[in-house]
Image (cartoon, rainbow, N blue to C red):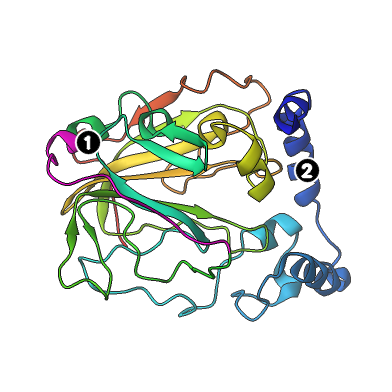
C-alpha cells in the first residue's frame, strides 16, 4: 500500500525543491541554533565537525560537513578494507555469482547483478571464485555497528578478530546512513576505479519502514556505482539515493549530475556508463 501511494508522488521533484531549500544561506547569527536543532532531531554529534557552526553557510553545507582530523582513524593494514561511510551495518554476506540474491528483508530479495548493472565485472570475478558456499548475516536492529569497525566490503577477505584465518570469497555489506550521520563517502582501500554507472531511478525513502514494504528498493532507486580493482580483486561501491537525498556528487567526476530535472525516472536497469581513462588503469584513489 505504501509503495503504491509513494509511486503517485513526484518524489524526484520534491527532492529537488528540498535540495534548493537546503542550499539557502542561513544568517550567521541563526546558524548555531538551526544546526543544533537539526542535531537534536537527527542525533548528530556536534563535537566532530571540522569547522565552527557559524562557518557552515547552509543546511546543505552542514549536511555534507567534513570531520575533525582523527575523528575516524583509518586502519593502515593494507589487507583491511575500512567502511566507506559512517553508517549502520544492515546486512553482510558472501556472493556466489552475479545471480546471487541479496535479502532486503525477509521475503524481499534482489539480484546483485541488478544493483550493479548487467555489464558489471562481478560476472568475471565470481567465475574465478568457484569454491565455498554463499553465506549471509543479518545485523540485529539493536546493534550499534558503526563504520569504523573492521568490516570488509569486497573480495577476497572478510577480516574478523575471532577468525583464525581470513575467509576467501567476494563479500558484500549494506550500510544505512541516518539523516544525522556524516554523509561523505570514502575509499575503503587503495584501488583503481575503472567504471562509473549512473542509474536514473526513483527516490523512495530508505528508512526501516520503506525497506520492509517496497520491493527491490535499492534497485529501483537512483544510484551511482563505482567499480574497479584493488590488489586482491574486484571492488564495487553503490551509493543509493533517497527521498530528499537525490544528489550524489563525485569528486573524481564533478560534472556528473543526478536527479536531473531534464531526465525521467528510467527503468531500473537503464544506466549511463563512463569508462575512466586510461582504460584498464582507470582512476587511482587512496584509502
Q: Nearer the viewer, mark 1 or mark 2?
A: 2
Question: Is mark 1 in CB contact (under 8 Å) with mark 2?
Answer: no
Tell me the magenta residue range.
125-141
Seen in the picture, residue 44 relative to 114 is either above or below; the reply is below
The single residue placed furthest to the front in the displayed view is: 107
Position of residue 216 relative to residue 281, above or below, is above
For residue 188, which quarter of the picture? Answer: bottom left
The main secondary structure of the magenta stretch is: loop
Q: Measured from the top left, where is residue 216 in percent x and y?
A: 53, 31
The circle drawn on residue 161 is: none
Residue 197, given in percent of the width and then of the height, sits at 41, 31
Residue at image position (45%, 75%) is 72
Decide which of tag 1 and tag 2 comes sooner along the chain: 2
Residue shown at the point (61%, 43%) measured from the top left: 211
Circle 1 — which element?
loop
Q: Is residue 135 magenta?
A: yes
Which residue is labeled 2 in the image?
A: 18
Per the image, label 2 sits on a secondary structure element best described as: helix
Residue occupied by mark 1: 278
Amino acid at each position: 500500500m505504501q509503495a503504491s501511494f509513494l509511486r503517485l508522488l513526484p518524489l524526484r521533484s520534491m527532492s529537488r525543491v528540498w535540495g534548493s531549500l537546503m542550499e539557502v544561506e542561513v544568517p550567521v547569527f541563526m546558524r548555531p541554533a538551526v544546526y543544533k536543532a537539526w542535531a537534536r532531531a537527527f542525533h548528530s554529534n556536534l563535537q566532530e565537525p571540522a569547522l565552527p557552526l557559524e562557518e557552515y553557510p547552509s543546511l546543505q553545507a552542514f549536511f555534507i560537513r567534513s570531520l575533525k582530523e582523527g575523528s575516524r582513524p583509518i586502519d593502515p593494514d593494507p589487507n583491511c578494507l575500512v567502511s566507506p561511510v559512517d553508517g549502520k551495518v544492515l546486512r553482510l554476506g558472501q556472493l556466489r555469482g552475479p545471480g546471487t540474491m541479496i535479502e532486503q528483508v525477509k521475503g524481499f530479495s534482489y539480484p546483485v547483478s541488478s544493483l550493479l548493472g548487467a555489464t558489471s565485472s562481478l560476472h568475471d570475478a565470481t567465475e574465478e571464485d568457484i569454491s565455498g558456499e554463499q553465506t549471509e548475516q543479518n545485523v540485529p536492529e539493536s546493534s550499534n555497528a558503526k563504520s569504523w569497525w573492521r568490516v570488509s566490503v569486497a573480495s577476497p577477505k572478510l577480516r574478523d578478530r575471532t577468525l583464525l584465518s581470513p575467509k576467501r570469497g567476494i563479500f558484500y555489506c549494506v550500510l544505512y546512513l541516518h539523516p544525522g550521520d556524516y554523509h561523505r563517502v570514502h575509499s575503503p582501500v587503495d584501488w583503481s576505479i575503472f567504471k562509473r554507472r549512473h542509474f536514473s531511478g526513483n527516490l523512495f525513502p530508505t528508512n526501516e519502514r520503506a525497506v520492509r514494504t517496497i520491493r527491490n528498493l535499492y534497485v529501483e532507486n537512483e544510484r551511482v556505482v563505482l567499480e574497479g580493482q584493488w590488489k586482491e580483486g574486484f571492488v564495487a561501491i553503490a551509493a543509493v539515493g533517497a527521498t530528499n537525498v537525490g544528489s550524489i556528487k563525485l569528486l573524481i567526476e564533478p560534472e556528473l549530475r543526478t536527479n536531473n530535472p531534464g531526465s525521467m525516472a528510467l527503468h531500473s536497469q537503464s544506466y549511463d556508463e563512463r569508462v575512466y581513462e586510461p582504460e584498464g588503469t582507470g582512476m587511482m584513489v587512496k584509502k
